[in-house]
Structures are given as structure tokens and as C-alpha cells.
């Protein structure tokens, strides 16, 4: 393989080390929600002094036969409920039949889904079609199923019509980039057989319809230059690409902007341009992690630098409104995640990002979880503790070369990767970070005994499951329900004289959250 990949392969298989998790921190209170909850509870206590069990209606000891709270217009009650956490909404439903009817209405639960998952997610869910028919969701049932998610369904997608003429397809590869933008899958670069990097760009239109067949189209642009181990994120309708390694082992630190457009007459086009970022830039690197923050920021961490050592620095790219200029800034905080490569960064909200796994300075494979938070206007890393006792015996969490994507419901879907023994994984895990951030927002520090025991959950996988792989790439569609997986390093056929063999994969899979709606 590439000289650098070959060197990296020798680093992948150290003896296992135990990873310790430590440190806790508070996230500022969600003060508005707490004030509203306190006010509503006080109102209920003062106005409903008579036990509600004596009446199934909203009657009270008031002379006019009703409590003042029952005179509040329904749309006002609706607005109040949208400010409350779920447990308070269910408590409110227990007061009487009228309020129970309101809190179980489909319109309220659609609004709660929009509140907790975002308008773009719900709009994408509503527009998603199967066999040309848009799906209808009972919103309360959907919310419950997302919260209790335990299964995914996998499909191998055809990339050319059955029985038809075979189309030109992307070469098998690993350490590439794969993004969903403007209704399209965009694939760039990576490393392949023969020790070569790739410099090709491919696009496939997916849209809002479920398709078993996707047609790849190669984009002839000539830029960026060939590389693997780079990062590429989505900001709006644009791609932002940084760094990577070429087949001579040279690390890069250039930044590129890509724009995808879908035309009725011209098909799909993608244009790349080098971004002007001034003289202050991160050191060259590859195998780092990156993600978007807010609407015009890119966050990167770690990777393998010029000397071959793993890095532990954090940088933020601030983009101008028109995305023509950018400014890099190094973020120095204490504590911060140790140096590593092959890890993931995943945005879980406008102000928060999750880091997981990777390979450390001693070549150990890691399983620590860190939260990068800017909600109070300051940059900071917070390490999240979790209890390993709820992980089934025989299963291991430490991994490198995995994927971690935000799915509907504010959870991370983690797939694949490899451990210290070169075992490539095909398991799916949900990292339920939403429970942690909600406790932090209430002002209480997370406790391993109370908040973190259910942080991890392994999902069942059905259908045509992809084989174990590492250094693949994955991305989700705007609904957060569908995950696309392409490429990676997988186990090949063994020859009698070989103890193991790796090969590059070139298949495309669709992983769907299994919902019975």
C-alpha cells in the first residue's frame, strides 16, 4: 500500500491498553426552561389543591366551576408545553382528560419532534418517499420508536441496472471522504491497491426517494490533488476539505471549497476552489478528525503530522459569509483530548461536538468520549465518564477507523472500525449523548451511576449486513434516518501461506433505522 499507509498498518496492532476515563464538568443551566417549569408547577400546586383523582374533568373548587388554568387558550397552553421537558408534559397530562387530550394530540407531537430534532429533519422525513409514495407518520409513535430504537436494516445498493450495461464505477478504496449534500452523495480521493492515492471525484443523486439503484457520475475537475486521510465536511450546500496525505507521504494543510449543483439540462456539477485562509494555518496532517460547527465553522483535531507523530491540537476555521475567505484559530484548553488519529468528531448541536476513539501516542486503541462545548461563549473540552458494566461481555468499544454520524433523535450511530488486534468490526452502536447533555443543561454534573449507565446501546442489524471494515466512510441524509456506507478495508480471501490479507472494498450500503410507523 502507500508508504504512509504501510507505516500506519504496522502501527495498528499494539497490545491492548486499558483506557481510563476521568473528569467531569458542568454545562450552564437552561434557565428559561427551568423558570417556565417552576412557574407551571407553582400554578398547578396553587390552583389544583384538591386531589385530581376525585374528578376526571377539569373541575375545581372554584365557584365558577373551573380552575383559572383551564381558561388559558389552547394555543397558549400549547406554547407552554413546547418549553417543557417530556416528563413534565406527561405529568401535565395526568391532571385531567382535557389536558390529556391536548398532550396526546398528533399536532403537539409533530411540534415536539420539530423542537427536539429540527425543522430540516422533519421536513426531510415528510418528503421522503418509498415507491413514489410519501410516508405518513403518527408523531407520538415515531418519537417513542426513535427513543427506543434497537434495530437497523441494511441494504446493498446496486450501482448499475440489473441485466443492463455495466457503468463506470468508483474504484475500491479506504480513507476517502463521503458526504451528502444538495441531494447527492459526493465521493472524493482515498487510498487504493498498488500503493496509490486517488484524486477522483464521484457524485450520485439520491434525492428524497428511496432508490435501490444509484448511478455514479465521475466529475473531471483535476483538483484537489490526490490524497487520503483528508477531512471533508458539509456547510450548507458547500463542501469544505482540509489536509490529507499523498502517496509520497507528504502531509497537506490546504483548504478547499466545493459546490454541488443539480441542473435539469447539465446534470450534476461540482466545482472546487482553493480557499484563501491567510498565513496562519494548522500544521500539515492526515488521519485527523473534523466536523462542522454552527453555520460557518469547521473544527479539526489531532491526526498524524509531518514527523509521523500523532497530534493533539484543536483548530477552528471561521468562514466569511460568502465563503470566499477563512481564518484559522488554534484553540488551547485544559483539559483536552490526548493526541490521536483515526478518531471521529460529530456535531450534536449548534454548540456541541463529540469526539470518540482513535489510536493514541502509544498506538493503543481508545474508547474515551469527549464533548467540545461553546454554549457559554467559551471553548472547552469536557471528558464524559461512562460505566462499562452495561456493555455485554465479549464486546469491546475501543476502535479506530470507525464512523460516527448524528441520526434522528440526537444520537450518534457508530459503525465498524478495528481494535488493537486488527479485528475489523461490523457492529452498530448508539451513543445516547442526548441524555448526558440534558442533565448537564439542568446544572447537575453527569454521574456515572445515574446518567451514564445507558450511554451505550448495541443495535441489532437485519438484512444484507456489510462485512466488518475499517477506514470506510459514512454519511446520513437530511432526515437522519438513512446512513450510507462506502468502501473501507475488509478481510480478503486467505492464501495458505498468509496469516491474513486485507483488501479494499467498493460497495455502497444503505442502513435504515428500523421504525414501524
Image: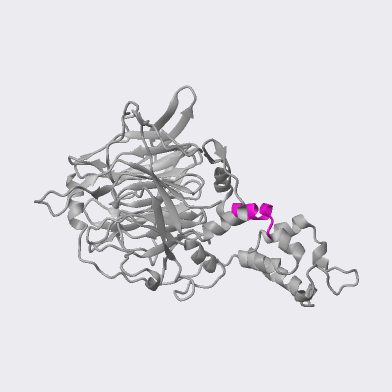
Query: Taking 466 as reference, is 319 left or right?
Result: right
Query: Taking 337 as reference, is 437 left or right?
Result: right
Query: Taking 418 as reference, is 33 left or right?
Result: right
User: What residue sits 43% from the left and 43% below the top?
Assistant: 326
Residue farthest to the left? Answer: 497
**Quarter placement of the N terminus:** top left
Q: Nearer the viewer, residue 326 or 125?
A: 125
Is 296 located above or below residue 314 in the figure?
Answer: above
- Is 92 one of the magenta-colored residues? no
Question: For the magenta stretch, what is the residue range?
Answer: 104-114
Quadrant housing residue 337: bottom left
**Colouring style:** one colour
User: What residue sits 48% from the left and 42% below the top?
Assistant: 320
Q: Position of residue 453 (x, y in %)?
A: 44, 71
Query: Taking 492 as reference, is 223 left or right?
Result: right
Q: Position of residue 492 (x, y in %)?
A: 21, 48
Q: Position of residue 351 (x, y in %)?
A: 50, 56
Q: Position of residue 419 (x, y in %)?
A: 27, 60
Quadrant housing residue 197: top left
Residue farthest to the front? Answer: 163
Residue farthest to the right? Answer: 63
Q: Nearer the viewer, residue 48 or 187?
A: 48
Is 333 located above or below residue 227 in the figure?
Answer: below
Amino acid at each position: 500500500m502507500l508508504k504512509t499507509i504501510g507505516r500506519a498498518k504496522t502501527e495498528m496492532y499494539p497490545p491492548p491498553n486499558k483506557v481510563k476515563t476521568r473528569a467531569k464538568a458542568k454545562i450552564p443551566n437552561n434557565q428559561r426552561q427551568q423558570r417556565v417549569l417552576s412557574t407551571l408547577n407553582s400554578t398547578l400546586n396553587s390552583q389544583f389543591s384538591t386531589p385530581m383523582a376525585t374528578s376526571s374533568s377539569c373541575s375545581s373548587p372554584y365557584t365558577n366551576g373551573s380552575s383559572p388554568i383551564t381558561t388559558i387558550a389552547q394555543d397558549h397552553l400549547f406554547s407552554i408545553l413546547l418549553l417543557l421537558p417530556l416528563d413534565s408534559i406527561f405529568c401535565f397530562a395526568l391532571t385531567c382528560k382535557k389536558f390529556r387530550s391536548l398532550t396526546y394530540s398528533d399536532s403537539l407531537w409533530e411540534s415536539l419532534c420539530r423542537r427536539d430534532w429540527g425543522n430540516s429533519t422533519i421536513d426531510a422525513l415528510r418528503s421522503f418517499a418509498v415507491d413514489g409514495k410519501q410516508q405518513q407518520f403518527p408523531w407520538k409513535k415515531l418519537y417513542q420508536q426513535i427513543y427506543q430504537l434497537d434495530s437497523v436494516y441494511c441494504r446493498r445498493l446496486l450501482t448499475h441496472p440489473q441485466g443492463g450495461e455495466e457503468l463506470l464505477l468508483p474504484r475500491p478504496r479506504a480513507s476517502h471522504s463521503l458526504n451528502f449534500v444538495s441531494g447527492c452523495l459526493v465521493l472524493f480521493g482515498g487510498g487504493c491497491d498498488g500503493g496509490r492515492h486517488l484524486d477522483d471525484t464521484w457524485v450520485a443523486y439520491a434525492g428524497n426517494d428511496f432508490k435501490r439503484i444509484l448511478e455514479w457520475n465521475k466529475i473531471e475537475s483535476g483538483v484537489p490533488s490526490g490524497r487520503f486521510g483528508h477531512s471533508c465536511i458539509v456547510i450548507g450546500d458547500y463542501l469544505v476539505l482540509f489536509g490529507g496525505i499523498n502517496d509520497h507521504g507528504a502531509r497537506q494543510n490546504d483548504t478547499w471549497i466545493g459546490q454541488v449543483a443539480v441542473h435539469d439540462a447539465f446534470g450534476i456539477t461540482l466545482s472546487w476552489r482553493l480557499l484563501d485562509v491567510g498565513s496562519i494555518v494548522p500544521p500539515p496532517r492526515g488521519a485527523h478528525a473534523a466536523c462542522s460547527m454552527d453555520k460557518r465553522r469547521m473544527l479539526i483535531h489531532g491526526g498524524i503530522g509531518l514527523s509521523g507523530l500523532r497530534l493533539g491540537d484543536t483548530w477552528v476555521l471561521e468562514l466569511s459569509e460568502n465563503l470566499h475567505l477563512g481564518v484559522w484559530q488554534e484553540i488551547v484548553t485544559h483539559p483536552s483530548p490526548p493526541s490521536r488519529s483515526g478518531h471521529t468528531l460529530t456535531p450534536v448541536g449548534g454548540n456541541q461536538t463529540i469526539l470518540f476513539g482513535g489510536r493514541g501516542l502509544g498506538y493503543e486503541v481508545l474508547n474515551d468520549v469527549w464533548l467540545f462545548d461553546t454554549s457559554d461563549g467559551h471553548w472547552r473540552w469536557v471528558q464524559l465518564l461512562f460505566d462499562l458494566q452495561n456493555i455485554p461481555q465479549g464486546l469491546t468499544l475501543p476502535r479506530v477507523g470507525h464512523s460516527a454520524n448524528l441520526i434522528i433523535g440526537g444520537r450518534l450511530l457508530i459503525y465498524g472500525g478495528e481494535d488493537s488486534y486488527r479485528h475489523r468490526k461490523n457492529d452498530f452502536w448508539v451513543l445516547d449523548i442526548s441524555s448526558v447533555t440534558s442533565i448537564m443543561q439542568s446544572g447537575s454534573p453527569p454521574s456515572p451511576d445515574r446518567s451514564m449507565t445507558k450511554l451505550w446501546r448495541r443495535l441489532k442489524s437485519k438484512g444484507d449486513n456489510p462485512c466488518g471494515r475499517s477506514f470506510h466512510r459514512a454519511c446520513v441524509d437530511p432526515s437522519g434516518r438513512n446512513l450510507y456506507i462506502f468502501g473501507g478495508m475488509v478481510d480478503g480471501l486467505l492464501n495458505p501461506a498468509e496469516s491474513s490479507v486485507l483488501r479494499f472494498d467498493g460497495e455502497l450500503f444503505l442502513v435504515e433505522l428500523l421504525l414501524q410507523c
